[in-house]
Image: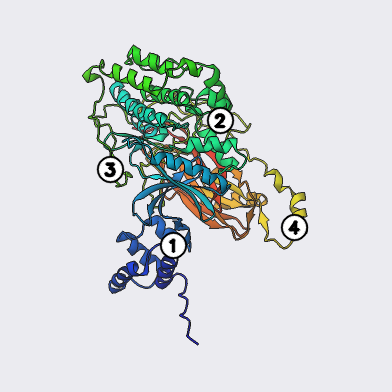
Amino acid sequence: MPVQPATPAPGTADWLVQELTSARVAEAVQLRPYVQEFRASGGGAVAPALAEFLVRTGLLTPFQADRALTGQAGKLVLGPYLLSEILGTGNLGTVFQAVGRSDRLRYAVKVLPLRSLWNVHLAKNQVRVFAELPPHPAVVPFVDVGTAGGSHYLAWQFAEGVTLAATVARSGRLAVGEAVRVLTHVADCLALCHAHGIVHGLLKPSNVLLGADGQPRILDLGVGAILSENIADDESMLDTISTANAALGMLDCCAPETLTDPTRRTPAGDVYSLGCVGYYLLTGALPFPGGTAVEKVIAHQTAEPTPPDRLNPELPGWLGDLIRAMMRKDPAARPGGMADVLAALKAGAGALPVAGGRPRPVPSPATSQTPMLTAPDPRPDPPRPVKPKSLIDFDLPDEQVTDPGFVLDDAPSGTTGEPTDYNLALPDPPPRVPGPPRPVPGPFRPAGSPGPAAPAVSPPVVIPPPPRASTSLLRRLKKKVMFWLPPTDVVQLSVFGPPSVAPGANILLQVFAHTPGAFESVRTLSRAFHQDGELLAAGFVTLEVVRGGELGLHLAVANARVGRSLHQLNWLGQPQPRSFEVHVPWESPVGQTVGILSAGLDGLLAGRVEFRILILPRRA
């Protein structure tokens, strides 16, 4: 009887090689010369040293190495794609940068909770529509939809650039000439899409990238149609939470008729959304920047925004009139279609003075597949005060002058601690629940500008009640009736850290996962290790967590950088801490800034906790 080869001991270099090859992250023949070079250099026999070597030589990304070292290499392969980096957590799910396993091209892949297999077939119709669409430099084609690894996925060609939301948040409103140039490109692309039966339905500043060549590129084309089918069909491909998150993420630029009937996504709705985007580019503010989700819906249906020429005196009369016409409540009163908008923009652009904008030559279609992770600021002459980047793609409440889903629209930190400019994603926050009033932030002020002092006191932290399904009675009943199942727990997430921070400083935020009854012990433990740490916020994982299950924690903070934003833990029923190092740049605006802790369970979004930190005034 042949002798079976011994299984390598976990944590050894041989074990890592087996982990990578068995998951087909790398083929044995591809990996062999690297391993031989590693051993010849005296690298040792432990897995972390080999992983570091493979990252240094470019065979693995830090994200892939981190997953492989924790025994999760199998989760890096998703159907025809090899996941290489987390780009963020979007309205619908986690967004990854991936490589096609057959063509070796790069893609942006959104991973969604598994729901209906039938509507995956329906969603493939959108892929076929894009295959017939004539090429356009602003189109990021929707190329694939499928199911693998217990999840749905949507795939687009990988685009590079910085979103309009991040550009305006960093450098202020665009010059009139530059804004007209961008709007013209976007309108031209949407006119082509509308002519072929494609409606975006989710257009907002975070869904338009500006490449290093200045070319706008439109993200999330195809999702609006999938959402419409999802809402109209009981066999929906998207789960209820994903659909609700997407709806929240579009509130700032959504047409009134779509807010009334989410299945009604039309070219006229795209005209309204582009009007909101133009308003944002030309004024630096959203049409209805404040209020709750319900208040925003009512505002889009009944209120008029502040006239754009009042916020930007440089605005030509024709452009202000066009933006107002595009944002009329009645679809029939808007311009006749995107082609009419495009004609008006082209006609008006010819009347703009040459010195009135920041003209750039119209770029040719981009063909590069290089990453845009460090794309330079697309505007070469920066005379304005620099606003800091936002790091979250959540709908940051109140402070947000950028997009709701992408105020985090600039760059979620990756596992390496390096901030990125690629903005496909962090999640929008849930609607607010009644609680103690928060201080209302004043108007946005560029970093370093004079203004009223920031509030010195944060509102008291209120811990919400546990989920209803987790009452002690139900838990006891479940324990008796389903005694053979592994035990589950209600898991509370508590965020501790300093309530304020000086610009340019680093702080440590500590997140505890624990049962509700262990809260006092957790608070005592946190104070013992971090005397300046206070409870910033608390919430619950929305599903009971099976002991032995994997819980992921993702942290993002607006106007700050998180060194390692994603941590994982195996829930064993006992309190477990995870630490996040946060750097607040010197130029960050003074006042309250928002953070979002997201919890993932088995690859699904399973809870969010919002907290605030006070950024103190700068000292000379």
Residue nearer the viewer, 87 or 581: 87
Answer few, some or many: residues within 10 Å of disc 4's Cα (few below 14, many 20 plus, some between 14 and 19): some
User: Which residue in the protein does label 2 denote?
Assistant: 262
Residue 443: which disc?
Answer: none
Three-letter code, disc 2: Pro
Report the Cα–Cα distance between label 3 and label 2: 35 Å
In the image, is residue 452 above or below residue 596? above
User: Which residue in the protein does label 4 denote?
Assistant: 479
Report the Cα–Cα distance between label 2 and label 4: 41 Å
User: Which residue in the protein does label 1 denote?
Assistant: 68
Residue 367: which disc?
Answer: 3
Tag nearer the camera, 1 or 2 = 2
Residue nearer the viewer, 377 or 359: 359
Tell me the element at label 2.
loop
Tell me the element at label 3.
loop
Give coordinates of residue 506: x percent, y percent.
41, 45
Three-letter code, disc 1: Ala
